[in-house]
Amino acid sequence: MTAKIKEFPGTSLNEQDFSNGKILYNFDKLNGVYSWDTGIGIGAYLASLKNGVILGSHCKTCRKIVVPPRIICEWCFRPMDEFVPLKDTGTVITYSLCYVTWDVQRITDPEIPAVIDIDGASPMHGIMHMLGEIEPQEVKIGLRVQAVWKSAKERQGSITDILYFKPVKEN
Amino acid sequence: MTLINHDPNSPLFWQGELPVTNRYTYGLAGEKFFRTLKEESKILGTYCPHCDHTYVPAAIFCERCLAKLDEWVDVGTRGEVDTYTILYVNLDGSPSETPQIIAFIRFGDGGLIHLLGEIDPEEIDFGMTVQAVFKPLTERIGSILDIVYFKPA
């Protein structure tokens, strides 16, 4: 409401109006099934996640290692040379504390998505994933983290085969 | 060595599903139209005295003169087949064993698109009178499918 407008025209509805039959409505579910071509690079990436390895690719000309792997170098536009297995540790480059879920529900314990610079890849090359086993106020840029994997039996070749990244104590 | 060869052990595609659902509320006129259809088995329209036009299904304003409409008329449950089509294919593209007949059934100056039943495709005539067949009262949900189909009157 604004200073001038005390009440907007129209009929306001809440969840009860739907559940107790005060309002009639049509419910519909979109047939949102899709199939996305992974290509060679991401296909190899998903296959190696199933084996518990984060894969990158290497361009010898540019001396770059990128993750996730691509088959064409983004700097010299030439084919990349080889896939390289990377470590499952890394450094938090940036992060966010989310108090709202993807379907707009409020939560008290925030989800913490972060971009993680993976060890073995070129500097500032990383993947986006969740942080876990950490208090929100302890998250810092530069934090050292390690992947927590699903068990080998549960892994199905998906980025969610990594459950989250947890902080590691450096010796 | 380049990476142009696809490893046969790696996936070719990623499959997923977008979880998209929606609720469509019928609006002021639609709410009354479907509520009456559900509870009283009546098809309602609204009449515009200025344009001498009966809207079916009911509309809340006149599309011609934009006046608010509050003259509700019960147009009965019998209408005329204005046009029809015969479907031999299901929604998912598979061939259907029994063809569905979809017709535009005229009520007042408007009408409803609905199914025809209890009729052979050869027997359909343009202008023939058809009668709404309702679901039992207890099974109705306030949808146009509370009418199962229209049959020859």
Image (cartoon, coloured by chain):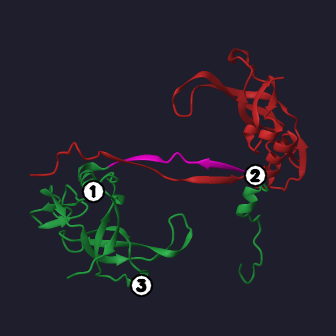
Q: From the image, give the main secondary structure of the stretch colored magenta.
A: strand
Counting from the top left corner in percent of width and height, residue B109 is at 81, 38
* Residue displayed at 36% across by 73% down: A114
Q: Chain of mark 3?
A: A
Q: Chain of mark 1?
A: A
Can you say whether A75 is above or below A41 in the image? Answer: below
Q: Is residue A33 magenta?
A: yes
- Relative to residue B132, is residue A119 drawn left or right? left
Which quadrant: the C terminus of chain A? bottom left
Can you say whether A119 is above or below A48 in the image? Answer: below
Q: Pick the residue in front: A169 or B5.
A: A169
Between marks 1 and 2, how big is the CA–CA gap?
47 Å
Return the mark for residue A137.
3
Q: Is residue B55 visible?
A: no
Q: Is residue B67 visible?
A: yes
Q: Quadrant of residue B102?
A: top right
How packed mark 1 is, by other alpha carbons closer than 10 Å (few <14, some 14-19, many 20 or more), is many
Q: Earlier in the sequence, mark 3 or mark 1?
A: 1
Counting from the top left corner in percent of width and height, residue B19 is at 52, 53
Q: Quadrant of residue A137?
A: bottom left
Can you say whether A55 is above or below B135 in the image? Answer: below
Between marks 3 and 1, how big is the CA–CA gap?
30 Å
Bounds of the magenta segment: A24-37
Return the residue at label 2: A24
Which chain is drawn using green? A
Return the residue at label 1: A49
Q: Residue furthest top?
A: B122
Between marks 3 and 2, how big is the CA–CA gap?
46 Å
What's the residue type where badge 1 is placed?
Answer: Leu
Q: Quadrant of residue A21?
A: bottom right
What's the residue type where badge 2 is placed?
Answer: Leu
Q: Is residue A59 magenta?
A: no
